Image (cartoon, rainbow, N blue to C red):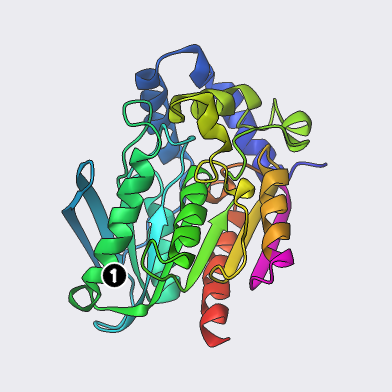
Amino acid sequence: MTLDPDALRVLEIGRAAGGEPFETGSVAAARTAYNASFPTLQGEHEPVAATQERQIDGTNGPIALRIHRGIGAPQSGAPALLYLHGGGGWVIGNLDSHDEICRLMANLGGAVIVCPDYRLAPEHKFPAGLEDCLATLRFIAENAAGLGIDIRRIGVAGDSAGGNLATVLTLLARDGLAPPLAAQLLIYPNTDARQASNSYQRFGDGFGLTATTMAWFRDHYVRTPEDIMDWRVSPLLAPDLARVAPTFVALAGCDILADEGAAYAARLQAAGAPLILRQWPGQIHGFVSMGRHIPAARQAVAEAVAAWRQFEKS
């Protein structure tokens, strides 16, 4: 598969910068390196109508939230999206690493976007981060009126590890174990922690996120190897995907997660779930967070928001 020229340029920038793979050093070093690199890749941080920083209580302690109200979002009855950041396999990423995506979604959707700084592994292994995300969803639903949100118009979104968490919340919502969700927007989601799909062979090295780095992330996240088979870690293994919220899936063609994302979309379609699947064949994992160099990043976010609007009309 031919790499998109913009994606190739990003890979060349990364090679020129040097640096060791995350798995060769400590978690602290990986976070430091990531935090230094993502500002050079992010797209524009659009101004929004309002931004609020606040803290809520969760099962495992306080959770920091960032709440954006998009330009044009109504003061009451606004659509809302719980955005769960990626960054690196439940180990790296924070409220700043995906802020440009949240701002863009808020403005394009005329919506309220809530992003939690959920707990990361290995200090907080599965299911701590998931529990933080669930607590945030419950907070949104329980405080919808005060947040100016229509409780019937709450969706969830996420990229990579955040996409993994979003799929799990959607399944919990279907089963009445979380507040109802109107949509899920998944950007190259991690759905199978077994890491055995063919795309791990095709794109396991030289395309940004490597197979060895992804294994390092996963092994920090799970408590024991048995967790890998838990559908809350590997949602592709969930016994039933019927009756979930309408779903948008964005996939990058040159990504080790491409096949498991496509397999999850196929299972949703087979189960009769409303689905919009979009693929960017020449793109790499993480391209939606690389808007400074990859114009397709904005296109992918715009298509996710357009799908969300379409689901609301159907």
In percent of width and height, residue 307 lies at 58, 73
Categorize mark 1 by other alpha carbons within 10 Å: few (<14), some (14-19), many (20+): many
How many marks can you see?
1
Q: Residue at x 35, y 51 (%)?
A: 133
Residue extending furthest toward the bottom: 313
Residue 175 sits above or below residue 18 on the image? below
Residue at the disc numbered 1 = 141
Label 1: state its secondary structure.
Answer: helix
Whether residue 259 sits left or right of residue 192 in the image: it is: right
In percent of width and height, residue 130 lies at 38, 46
Residue extending furthest toward the top: 24
Q: Residue at x 68, y 45 (%)?
A: 260
In percent of width and height, residue 229 lies at 58, 36
First to last magenta residue range? 269-282
Asked whether 41 falls inside the magenta stretch, the response is no
Pick the quarter of the image with the C terminus.
Answer: bottom right
Quarter-of-image position of residue 83: bottom left
Residue 33 sits above or below residue 158 on the image? above
Three-letter amino acid code of the residue under disc 1: Ala
Quarter-of-image position of residue 108: bottom left
Whether residue 185 sits left or right of residue 178 in the image: it is: right
Task: Please state which of residues 59 and 247 is positioned toward the viewer in this rendering.
Answer: 59
Whether residue 105 sits left or right of residue 191 in the image: it is: left
